[in-house]
């Protein structure tokens, strides 16, 4: 998975990336990320998520134009064991004040990593192996 913060037309989304964003999200992140250390932390998240091939994150801006929102979901077209959508996060006053946008993205990335690990674990035990144990 990758995080793409490149500019694009408003409303368009990058597909095939770990984290999908658009021009509005990118503009908001550029305005809110002020410290080099935050940018370094974001870069580490990007590198970590580049390895996740199971779960994606869609970043959005809420109607107020300032608040980030993120959907964490399976990249498989079919529901994965009944779950395609795992979690939705929206920034609140606490995350805005104490964690900032990078902390918010990190929280969504941690959920993506946990869900991907669960998916890999389930794939390791195939259905047939499980059903054979029940006979």
Image (cartoon, rainbow, N blue to C red):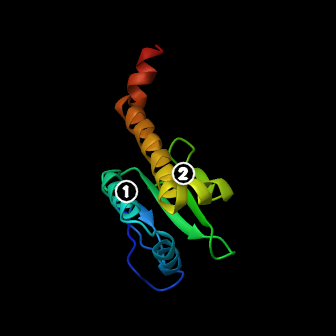
128 over 11 or under it: above or below: above
In the picture provided, is 91 more to the left or to the right than 74?
Answer: right
Can you tell which quarter of the image residue 1 is in?
A: bottom left
Which is closer to the viewer, label 1 or label 2?
Answer: 1
| Residue 41, numbered label | 1
Q: Nearer the viewer, residue 23 or 81?
A: 23
- Where is residue 123? Give x, y as percent: 38, 36
- Where is residue 108? Give x, y as percent: 51, 52
| Residue 84, numbered label | 2
Can the viewer see residue 125 in this picture?
yes
- Where is residue 39? Give x, y as percent: 37, 64
**Mark 2 secondary-structure assignment:** loop
- Residue at the (45%, 57%) spot, across then down: 56
Of the two numbered discs 1 and 2 on the same chain, state the one appearing first in sequence.
1
Residues marked 1 and 2 touching at CB (< 8 Å): no
- Residue at the (43%, 30%) spot, across then down: 127
C-alpha span from label 1 to label 2: 28 Å
Residue placed furthest toward the top:
135
**Badge 2: how crowded within 10 Å, few (<14), some, or many (20+)?**
some
């Amino acid at each position: 998975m990758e995080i793409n913060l490149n500019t694009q037309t408003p409303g368009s989304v990058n597909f095939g990336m770990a984290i999908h964003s658009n021009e509005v999200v990118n503009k908001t992140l550029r305005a809110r990320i002020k410290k080099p250390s935050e940018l370094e932390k974001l870069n580490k998240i990007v590198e970590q998520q580049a390895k996740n091939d199971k779960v994606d994150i869609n970043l959005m801006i809420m109607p107020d134009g300032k608040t980030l929102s993120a959907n964490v979901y399976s990249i498989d077209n079919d529901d994965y064991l009944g779950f395609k959508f795992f979690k939705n996060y929206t920034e609140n006053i606490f995350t805005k004040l104490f964690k900032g946008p990078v902390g918010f993205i990190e929280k969504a990335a941690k959920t993506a990593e946990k869900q991907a690990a669960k998916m890999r674990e389930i794939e390791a035990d195939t259905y047939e192996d499980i059903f054979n144990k029940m006979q």
